[in-house]
Each structure stands twice: as C-alpha cells, then as structure tokens.
Amino acid sequence: VSTWSAVPAGPPDPILGVTEAFKADKDPRKINLGVGAYRDEQGKPYILPSVKKAEELVRAANPDKEYLPITGLPEFTKNAALLAYGADSQPIKQGTVAVTQSISGTGALRIGGAFLARHYPHAKAIYLPSPTWGNHIPLFRDSGLEVRHYKYFNKETVGLDFEGLKADLKAAQEHSIVLLHACAHNPTGIDPTPEQWREISDIVKEKKLFPFFDMAYQGFASGSTTKDAFAVRHFVSEGHQIALAQSFAKNMGLYGERVGAFSLTTADPEEKARVDSQLKIVIRPMYSNPPIHGARIANAILSSSELYGQWETEVKGMADRIISMREKLYNMLQKDLSTPGEWGHIKSQIGMFSFTGLTPPQTKALAEKAHVYMTADGRISMAGLNSGNIEYFAQSVDKAVR
Ligand code: PLP
C-alpha cells in the first residue's frame, strides 16, 4: 500500500480554477476576468517599458549570482520602505523601520504572520475584513495566528459597511491584531475614505489593536503612489506602530519575479536591531534568502530619478486604463442597455477588481452561455476588459440579470 493512499484530494484553488476553465473553452468570444494580473488594450500581459530599461541596466552591469543576505538587497529594501512610508515620516527619518525583502506580497504577509506568532506579546488573534483576499485566511492560520473577522461589505448597497466595521473593531479583543488593506481592497474594490481611515485609526488606538497593512497595489489604485499610501502614512503619523506587507507584483508588473518587502516600525535603533535579528531567525529556516533578479530590477527603478519618473507615468497609465473601463462599463449597463439594477459601484470602486453584485447562478450562466469567466462571488478583474471585448461583456451581463 502506498504511503500516500490516505491523502484526500483537495479542492482546486477558487481563483486559479477559473483560468483552467477559461483555457478549456474553445469559443473565440471567451473572456477571462478571473485573473488578478494587468492586461493591456490587446488583452495581453504587459511588461512596463521602465522595467525593460531597468532590466537592461541590470544586465549591462553583468552582476554575479551570489546569494543575497537573509533580508535581501539592502538598497532595495531601503527604497521600498521609502516608497511606502514617505521621506518625511518619523520612522524613516529616525532609521527605525525594520525591513526585509520578501517573496512578493504573499511572502511578506507570511513573514509577518510568523513573526507575530512568535513575538507578538498579546492575543495572537488577527481580525480580517469579511470578505478578504481568499489567501489571507489559510496564510495567517498556517502562520499560527487565530483568524477572526470584521464586517466590511454591505451587500445591499454594494458598498462599505462602515457601521458594521466600526462596531466589530470596537467589540474586538483588546490588543489583538487587525489586518487592513492599504488601498484597492481585494475582492470588493471598496476603500474607506480618508475621513473614515481617520476614524478607523482612532478606534485602533482606543482598542490598542495592532495594525497590519497589506499594500499589494500602491500606485495601481489611483495612479498615485502617494495617494494610495494615505492610510499607511496616516497611521504612522498618528503614532501607531505598524506591520506592512508590500508587493511589486502589480505596480511594477513583476508578478513572477516575486519582489516584495515586509517591515515593522520600532521605537528606536536599538529595538530595530533586535527586531532585525529576529526577522532573520524567522526567515533563515523558511527559504534562507530571497531571489535576486527582480529586486535588482525594482531597485534600478526606485534608485534612478529618471526611471522612477517614467515608472510613475506607466503606473498611472495602467490605473487610468482601468478607470476608463469602469466608466465605459457603467455607461453601457446603466445608460445604453438600461440593465436592471444599480451599477454606480462599477464606477466608484477602486483598483483591479470590481464586486459586480452578480450572484453565483448568474456567474455560472455567464460562463456556460456567454464564455465569460469570473470568480463565483461575482468579482471581475477590470484589467481583463478592453475596447475589443467590453461591449460583448456588457451585453452578456445584461442578458444574465434579466
Ligand atoms: N494581498 C492582496 C490583497 C492581493 O490581492 C495579492 C495578490 O493578488 C497579494 C497580497 C499578494 O500577491 P503577490 O504575492 O503576488 O505579491
């Protein structure tokens, strides 16, 4: 009998499963709105020209392939922290940000989960928004934290359940951890306003919660890296100590290169040194040290004012294309087709994703009858739409809801 005969078959990944169904479909009109990766106007993956240039610079320097230190490329992590916190933030000026390179955003979250499970001195429970990125739940559970939830989404208004959110955070166990999507909340596309962030910050302070920011989309949401960092910077300026996971997958299109950073703000340089030493002890037995190539590319951009400027324009280009697709889709559904329902949320939501409000039976019908694929919760990746397929998509949605 085989050693593995009792291993049960697990369920397919709910997001990656959509792409498999899409690939198997032979209809030429098929559309994949499941995948969380940017697509250009031709529906193709997009390599940013600034990334191409940066890669050429890296190649031209003919660098070796030696191991990085455990916490990664020091210039890169310094610049990544600067991008997130801003040059005038206290912890940056005081040199008290403990930062390490990570295997993209997922790896940053996992380092954070493991560090908190080992060193957080209070309740090792983390509150996640409901709903949240599907991977947050097993990720924090496998890190050794107890996963709890707070209200986030209001089905009736297809908007933020701000009253529910506040009530749940006020009722949360004191000193526990709260995960906040810094911008472009996935899957809903709904972010708190700056005013609401201020209120959240006050509650977090009152309840002595520990804020852990997941910033997977800085710059990608609004087109401005500064605007998208508002929540993180506001919390820091309010004196919160924070944990932060950063990803360069979306904003630099470096998905498969796995470029990210994890950081903690600390009280003083001496404490930072102790935290740094323990980050290394968490990381060393996990994967020893991070990949080098993508970090070099990202750092080439972050450290050159010319490439940085070009990158900012290109991030804005991606954000603007998505925003224009929102506008077009809204106009088609609400105005041209008079599709039953209210579609204002398509326009007001932020970032790559939109929670359409389509129900599981409707998403199933869209896949089977119209060859349009999305996750069962009705989430669509706006980046999968372009002027070549948006009209067909709007007509298909119109049919599905009538
Ligand atoms: N966090 C959120 C909210 C995300 O949407 C994603 C990607 O979809 C990630 C983290 C991590 O992505 P990656 O590991 O590719 O950086």
Image: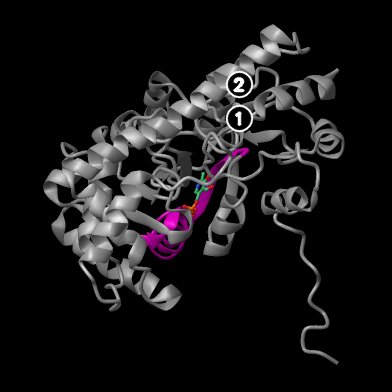
Residue at the spot of label 2: 346
- Mark 1–mark 2 Cα distance, whole angstroms, equals 6 Å
Q: Residue at x 57, y 44 (%)?
A: 36
Q: Is residue 100 visible?
A: no
Task: Determine contact: label 1, label 2, CB under 8 Å.
Answer: yes
In the displayed structure, 64 sits above or below 182; it is: below
| Above or below, comparing residue 300 to residue 175 in the picture | below
Give the residue at mark 1.
Answer: 354
At x 66%, y 35%, the residue is 379
Q: Quadrant of residue 146?
A: bottom right
If you read the primary sequence from the N terminus, does the residue marked by circle 1 or circle 2 appear first?
Answer: 2
- Quick check: 5 left or right of 103? right
- How is this picture coloured? one colour
Cβ of mark 2 under 8 Å from ligand 1: the answer is no
**Region in magenta:** 102-131
Expressed as whole percent of the image width and height from the top left, the position of residue 138 reads: 61, 57
Q: Magenta segment: does it hold 104? A: yes
Q: What SS does tag 1 mark?
A: strand
Residue farthest left in this picture: 94
- Other-residue count near label 2 (Cα within 10 Å), few / some / many at <14 / 14–19 / ≥20: many
